[in-house]
Image (tube, coloured by chain):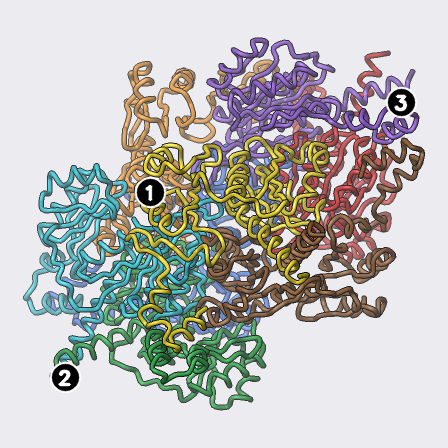
Chain colours: A red, B yellow, C brown, D purple, E blue, F green, G cyan, H orange
Amino acid sequence: MIKEILKQVQQGKLTVADAEKELATYEDLGFAKVDYHRKKRQGFSEVVFGEGKTAEQIISIIKALQLKDKSVLVTRISKEKANQVLEACPSFAYNEVAKILFWKDSDQDSFFEGYIAIVCAGTSDLPVAEEAAVTAEILGCKVRRIYDVGVAGIHRLLNNIDEIQNATVTVVVAGMEGALPSVVGGLVSHPVIAVPTSIGYGANFNGLSALLTMLNSCSSGISVVNIDNGFGAAYNAALIHRLIQKGAKHNENALS
Amino acid sequence: MIKEILKQVQQGKLTVADAEKELATYEDLGFAKVDYHRKKRQGFSEVVFGEGKTAEQIISIIKALQLKDKSVLVTRISKEKANQVLEACPSFAYNEVAKILFWKDSDQDSFFEGYIAIVCAGTSDLPVAEEAAVTAEILGCKVRRIYDVGVAGIHRLLNNIDEIQNATVTVVVAGMEGALPSVVGGLVSHPVIAVPTSIGYGANFNGLSALLTMLNSCSSGISVVNIDNGFGAAYNAALIHRLIQKGAKHNENALS
Amino acid sequence: MIKEILKQVQQGKLTVADAEKELATYEDLGFAKVDYHRKKRQGFSEVVFGEGKTAEQIISIIKALQLKDKSVLVTRISKEKANQVLEACPSFAYNEVAKILFWKDSDQDSFFEGYIAIVCAGTSDLPVAEEAAVTAEILGCKVRRIYDVGVAGIHRLLNNIDEIQNATVTVVVAGMEGALPSVVGGLVSHPVIAVPTSIGYGANFNGLSALLTMLNSCSSGISVVNIDNGFGAAYNAALIHRLIQKGAKHNENALS
Amino acid sequence: MIKEILKQVQQGKLTVADAEKELATYEDLGFAKVDYHRKKRQGFSEVVFGEGKTAEQIISIIKALQLKDKSVLVTRISKEKANQVLEACPSFAYNEVAKILFWKDSDQDSFFEGYIAIVCAGTSDLPVAEEAAVTAEILGCKVRRIYDVGVAGIHRLLNNIDEIQNATVTVVVAGMEGALPSVVGGLVSHPVIAVPTSIGYGANFNGLSALLTMLNSCSSGISVVNIDNGFGAAYNAALIHRLIQKGAKHNENALS
Amino acid sequence: MIKEILKQVQQGKLTVADAEKELATYEDLGFAKVDYHRKKRQGFSEVVFGEGKTAEQIISIIKALQLKDKSVLVTRISKEKANQVLEACPSFAYNEVAKILFWKDSDQDSFFEGYIAIVCAGTSDLPVAEEAAVTAEILGCKVRRIYDVGVAGIHRLLNNIDEIQNATVTVVVAGMEGALPSVVGGLVSHPVIAVPTSIGYGANFNGLSALLTMLNSCSSGISVVNIDNGFGAAYNAALIHRLIQKGAKHNENALS
Amino acid sequence: MIKEILKQVQQGKLTVADAEKELATYEDLGFAKVDYHRKKRQGFSEVVFGEGKTAEQIISIIKALQLKDKSVLVTRISKEKANQVLEACPSFAYNEVAKILFWKDSDQDSFFEGYIAIVCAGTSDLPVAEEAAVTAEILGCKVRRIYDVGVAGIHRLLNNIDEIQNATVTVVVAGMEGALPSVVGGLVSHPVIAVPTSIGYGANFNGLSALLTMLNSCSSGISVVNIDNGFGAAYNAALIHRLIQKGAKHNENALS
Amino acid sequence: MIKEILKQVQQGKLTVADAEKELATYEDLGFAKVDYHRKKRQGFSEVVFGEGKTAEQIISIIKALQLKDKSVLVTRISKEKANQVLEACPSFAYNEVAKILFWKDSDQDSFFEGYIAIVCAGTSDLPVAEEAAVTAEILGCKVRRIYDVGVAGIHRLLNNIDEIQNATVTVVVAGMEGALPSVVGGLVSHPVIAVPTSIGYGANFNGLSALLTMLNSCSSGISVVNIDNGFGAAYNAALIHRLIQKGAKHNENALS
Amino acid sequence: MIKEILKQVQQGKLTVADAEKELATYEDLGFAKVDYHRKKRQGFSEVVFGEGKTAEQIISIIKALQLKDKSVLVTRISKEKANQVLEACPSFAYNEVAKILFWKDSDQDSFFEGYIAIVCAGTSDLPVAEEAAVTAEILGCKVRRIYDVGVAGIHRLLNNIDEIQNATVTVVVAGMEGALPSVVGGLVSHPVIAVPTSIGYGANFNGLSALLTMLNSCSSGISVVNIDNGFGAAYNAALIHRLIQKGAKHNENALS
């Protein structure tokens, strides 16, 4: 890309000032530099981490982002803050369990027929699992939810194993000892993204126990994201989904 | 017991000197106080922790203990040290994998027909599993070994689950992420004693990962011993076995 | 069991559909999969961990479980939540110190005459000790409470040692430095289940200090559960109790 | 699959004995249960973790595995041990930097034309990067190595960014502060798998510093494996590669 | 200095009482010893850490300090406490974002034309960045703020790199994984002072992750202050600024 | 003592029942076993740790203790709880800064003319320093307070060093980096008891930093108590004071 | 002292040069500044920490120190290094278990008839216990050794409790879970100095477990030194001993 | 700089190929990308971290670097490796204590007359202090060494305080409890760069204790580098020195 800009400058098609502008890929709001290039660079729009930002800041960022691309995603936003934002941005919707705010009409064409399995160990892991599920849906993926199938009652997992095995990617959410990804990882032939949750008590140390379990898993094919980071897992899964679609298109082109 | 001694003193059956002697329940070797009362107090003879003791010290302790009770158990003793001890104490045998030295003819009547299942996750956990198995056998218990059934290939565990379910107690030994006890704990109706091992690398932190996993297990019925403490798990299991036998006798008596 | 189902299918006694159903051992409430097989598999009904669940979720789970088995146990449930549940489930009772909700008429036949000693170090450890005591009672065991006998005044422990020595299992609850299980473990000949509590300050690190103490105990016969996990210790103790009873029955049968 | 076996049993096509055998998916070597189903279940053959196994054990496992599938992979195996194995298994080759032993003629058809970028921060991270690169190649993927492009000289990374951006998956290996995945993650639109290494000193704590950095990355699209786990990262990347190929085939089928 | 006092005593120019008084460099308020010598010894007046002191205590300290030097700085003071102090000390002003209270007319002659770049990674790091910026300004330095240029969008940093490279010192404030100082450190030829913030979640451990990242930075020229210690970083930067000015003066003198 | 009781039993001077009673050195309040022997055994009455006990429990314990010995000390008791206790026990007084409740007329004869120096580093360490000072006074020791003499202004310490050097024991209280005991320890020839406080922020980790500093001190003659444990330090110091007095008496006797 | 020097300077009794010299209290060996004032300032000669110093460095320091005071103590010195030093300094002796090198004829008049009890939990703690015992003896104190009385066999401790109770100070050395000081602390009325050792395995974490136990002890009257720091404990105990002697003298003077 | 290149391209003074080349600022050795721009970008040549690189790799890197700039610095290089390099690069010299290899005739014009004070606490901290001192000297700074002035004998520090106060920057190296920087920081009016060392034992945790102490210092004006990172501290100090010189020149220019 830089090469191209250089060429255009050389050929007089682009002034130096414009070339510099071309690189100015964000708007500076003072407290934040809103990234316009993200979608081009990373494939999805910028995602706003709602925690620690005021409703006013979030509204400003949304408005700046929407000048270029309507589909914005705000994660970790409380009901109170979300309500304030919704008044200013009525075209948005809020999912209370997942604590996600998103553009109602966002382009949710599921790009192909595969689905992501979102598996969680216990009822208390639900908010993180839902953060993952809703994120994946907003990013255009089909999702199947298989909840409360922790290893203490392994038959619950085994009874749903077909649905998990047929997914293209599985996100496994677990707190306490976090053993579920190891068991799932040994039963499937696709990537497993493990999300430790901070659910537990005592020597759980706010999710550290589950995190270490997942990092040390003896099953191959598991990678791990931060504690409670349902969004991150879903984002990874969506990237993989898009790759599959691309692979498909690529081969189509090769065929034609 | 103190009450009894008091009574005997009162009744003139015991002099004050003898009463004091009665409480002198160990021999003082200077560097060690050898405990003669252990078997009476705890049901099994004193177990000597071999690590950090010289062969000479171990020989002295064995000789002192054997004045009262022949069956002595020395754990964590290297082959070199064991060979030195065996020369001085030829009635002993040494198990190299388990690193245990024990009195060859120790009274290994299995007190009843139940058995302890010793389950381990991977081949590398074998030395700890064997420490547990050999200890349990020396303490007079039947043992069944079910090795290399880690959760990454859950079918290997499920294929052996009957043998585990029929045990009276199960000792589960696992390193890496230490998820195996949670799965076993959910499938059996007897106590599970979990032993984390220091096997693993990176964020395993010498067994800390497996230890935390086991402490945070969402399966009920699991208790945990120190990292690599196969002996401790087996000792606990043997205590439970003896209780069952006692229970049996108790009821027999009640019947007759 | 699988073999039997296979045989019945082969013999035409079971349709494939029914065979599959037979394995469907839980009801799916969406947010939870209620486990009907637990009692069969583990000997006690499923226990509901109340923390992090809403009163509504708890009520749904209780109602689903009670279709098959009335005796349900809910731990870590606050007074407020418990009151909400009690309105919907009037046949339940609530123990405020232990924070346990249970079916009032649950089948509390103490299955044999042995008892569990629940020992705690200080007055502040009482809630955890009571969680253990009440759990054990609900699971059908006799319990003796020996409270506030911490090692700083060892004579208080020694004065109660007979009652502890005569128990079949001892649960020792201690915070601060957690030294009590080591001392008790050296004085009894039955299993000791140690429960570290989060009571303390400074370098106690919310129970980590007591946990490490117990894991490193130089007394044999001690196993450890998670910090503040009074329920888990009692559940383990009850499993051992049941084994003793079984052992008794087993020998009876052998006699007859 | 279970359903199918049930049907075959019902239809008399499979005896109960054979149905059971069908589930017996491993050979029991005593110290190990060799998994024959792995390739079917997970898509790649079982990988043997060489550390902590003797050369003899490794040879036995290889021989058992090769009865069903020739392509075996042994990781973390020292030169000495590898030489012993090579004598017994002359059809294998050894890569000394990556410490990997593999079947020389293993079926390395790169299944499609995409490639995995293996990026590392410093010269000292090379062994882990090579473990990843060699693993990926053995699993049939094309690989491009972009080494020594740590963030201290960001221009080295930027000069190679096109090659990284055109990959389908990027594995980023970094020790010290482990900042490289965050920078790469912000510049690409495909999944990044981050591998912390134990390279560093002082407050690096054997890779903990790099591990935490990667887990807390503010770039989306990053997932993390254990410290020094180059194999695990490559295995994940290969799973994703295979998915893309599958996606391609799937669409081909849809077209025809 | 002691030598001089000794001489003056010897020469009778100073009585022993006065000599002792000369060393009495603070006023004892009972709860605090107010340091009058600080400015002479360290170049800047004593800075009062507001956290954990009552408004009354702060007022007393200010009043004592102002007997000798008007320019006092109070950090980490909440709005409520600041308002109470402002009533008693109307010549002070309060900066709410930076939580700093300072003497309105403090002598803010920027001593030379260089400036400190205050760079921060994300919007949530702003309070710490502002603590640094406001402190530096009160200590008489010019400041340029470059905010929200975290490594996830490296182009935002690169677009502002000239302004950062032209600074004399750069303070880099970052939470989450804290990778920004490493990248900045590799691009500038002046000292970088890194401030980890407690912003983040999960395995961030309240800033520990960012702290370790910065300590392990592979870029040379970076030193680190405590988590959230914006004040400390600015104080260091101001010391360096003053040195440059001194160096200038020194050479001027050398020239003349 | 046991010997004596045995003798008395033998001589018929003591019945078995009385002998047993003699060992019953506490009253059992159910939730607490109040220790009557403490003063005899340890030289000071039992001290009640107020945190985590209700006002009612504290009142019961005080009343039980006062049957035998009036001087009771309750530490870590909030103002609210103290007020409740004071209503029931009007002969007590409360020190709000030190959070200590004590018997107003407790026997505070300073047993000899030496004094304990209580030194603290900063104004924020005052509550812990006062807990130490008030405790020592109640236990009958003279105390001198030297506050706010942290190492950042070493001259404040040096100006008070004579008063510290003349003490018999010095208690040094410090938070933040906790360096003060090392400096004091190098300047005095008597025991220094170091108390880390939880005062600080960031990498202070609630006092862990100060605790480690003190444990690793390169000055000889320093021992350490738990974080914020002003009481413990004072108790130790008082024990040493009493020893000195005893030593004095001992020698007097030797003289006469 | 400074006051005195000031006065002497004022009175012309001391020149400024001499006054300065008076403060020059050490000899500068380049790699070390040998402290001549230590004995005056702290009551005992400087103690040389042998670890990490070469034999040559130790010899130089000893020779410098002996110019002013013959009794030098070198701790943590290996046999090899000690032999080298002994050749150069034949008037010294070496204790191999305690790893201490000391001046053979050092002035070991035990200053009064009290003794320090050195108590240790297990045989493996002996080297640390001996470091304490030998140090105390060299510093002129009587010592009684009570070894191998760990809490797992509490009767061994109780049988020796009289000897411990009659000491003036008790040093308690313990590894593993480190519970012994708590029990001893509750049984004596003098200060207890606790020394955690690094003896243990697994979750012992090189003595951290024992250290935390001792810091959190619920017994009053316990202070703690660094892991394995037998020297430090003995030094503290000797300081207390000297105080008692001083106290005695003080009162003698008061009497006369 | 980019702007200038753009302009030159526009003006036809630079071809696109040359513009790209201009950005190719390193040579790719395969295992390393040697950075030619470092001196331009950062002011000093690239420094090679010798640990974990073979002698061959180091020689290759040196030879590549010397094509553009002779003065190369290799840190953390063992004597053995250094000797191998010296054979191939005879114009280099090796400092064994500091473990630094450097170009003998490197341009060591001390750029101005100020000096850096290198202060260390104990004899064992010497290697790290020397790494700092030698590095600073090679980077062209004057250095004064003030060694073995730890806080346990504060008079040794105070006797050298003038020399420290007159430095422009002070590097303070300390292990054990790491208290020295706090004391120095309170006595000087220039920046202090603190280097924790891994010297110590027990709860020192390989330098963690000293690191935390320094980060939490209550003295202003202290920043910290990684454990044992003497090089990093000196590099920072040299950057500050150069700034002072620049400041001087700047003002000269302003004058003229």
Amino acid beneath label 3: Lys
* Figure quadrant of residue E48: bottom left
- For label 1, the residue is B59
Camera-near label (1 vs 3) is: 1
Left or right: C12 in relation to B12 = right
Secondary structure at numbered mark 3: loop
Q: Quadrant of the C terminus of chain G?
A: bottom left
The one of C190 and C122 positioned closer to us in this rendering: C190
The one of D232 and G27 positioned closer to us in this rendering: D232
Placement of C231 over or under A76, stated as above or below: below
3D distance between C-alphas at marks 1 and 2: 58 Å
Camera-near label (3 vs 2) is: 3
Q: Which mark is residue D13?
A: 3
Amino acid beneath label 1: Ile
3D distance between C-alphas at marks 1 and 3: 66 Å
Point out residue B72 in the picture as x, y percentages from the top left corner: 42, 45
